[in-house]
Image (cartoon, rainbow, N blue to C red):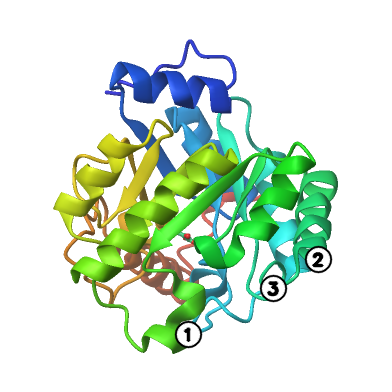
Amino acid sequence: MSVAKKDIKRVTTHILQGMKARGEKIAMLTAYDFSMARIFDAAGIDIILVGDSASNVMAGHETTLPITLDQMIYHAQSVIRAIDRCFVVVDLPFGTYQGDSKMALKSAIRIMKESGAHSVKLEGGSEVKDSIKRILSAGIPVMGHLGLTPQSIYKFGTYTVRAKEEEEAAKLLEDAKMLQKLGCFGVVLEKIPAQLGKQVSESIDIPTIGIGAGPDCDGQVLVSHDLLGITKDFHPRFLRRYLELFDTIKGAVEHYITDVKAVDFPSDKEQY
Ligand code: KIV
């Protein structure tokens, strides 16, 4: 059974804003290809994030750093072809927006123009202020991303919970307020204490989407491969697995191999 509001024809930033104002939670998931995006859109997901986690779960890299702008655009194009209703956010990959706001705008324009996506997401607060401002000035909706920002993994050194200390928590809150002031339509809060997720969500009017940031965020996001159990050896506390697809698919493929070897497939009915 689904409680998704499928009567909404198209999810927009305006609709997302209204959901926050009414206290209606926002459901967001990553997708990187046509077939998955079609299923998620049919299920009534509010936002699809074409995340740079594609670098991990699609390409098998250890971090999100190697994925390129061309590769992100390819994934975004596949997702956009699949959807009728949901809002699509695309990650600006590492090295395409930091430290050069003109390059940031060029990267965002390429994503919007070549994929047909609805918005971009980028990681960081005050450090990427100029890039955010310039992208917004072109009329491109921007989503922020604070807390654990995987593109900075070599600065952090670990994927542990961020902003546990007062100073880092205070900066995160200030950054969230700044993102709102600049005109971002939402912000992802990744792996921070639930209490801070609540405080940030109550301090700004734009939706907060949490991943390991507690139940008081205005919405939640998960990497779809984790939720579906396609990834296997990843067990952070925040993750709820709704399926164990690795084992299910492996079982089906083993069955197929057995049938082929035994000439049990194809049967009389499965041939011309
Ligand atoms: O790339 C991604 O999947 C993300 C989510 C973890 C929010 O940024």
Q: Amino acid at mark 1?
A: Glu
- Helix, strand or loop at label 1? It is loop
Q: Is residue 253 visible?
A: yes
Q: Residues within 10 Å of mark 1 (few under 14, many from 20)?
A: few
Measured Cα–Cα span from mark 2 to mark 1 = 26 Å
Q: Please give the residue where the numbered disc 3 appears in the rendered image.
A: 99
Q: Residues within 10 Å of mark 3 (few under 14, many from 20)?
A: some
Furthest residue toward top: 7
Is 9 placed above or below 119 here?
above
Near-viewer residue (222 or 118):
118
In which image quadrant can residue 245 be found?
bottom left
Q: Please give the residue where the numbered disc 2 appears in the rendered image.
A: 103
Q: Amino acid at mark 2?
A: Met
> How far across and down, in percent of the image, does residue 17 sit?
46, 24
Question: Which residue shows up at 26% across the image and 35% down it?
Answer: 202
Question: Which residue shows up at 80% across the image and 41% down it?
Answer: 138
Q: Amino acid at mark 3?
A: Gly
Q: Please give the residue where the numbered disc 1 appears in the rendered image.
A: 62
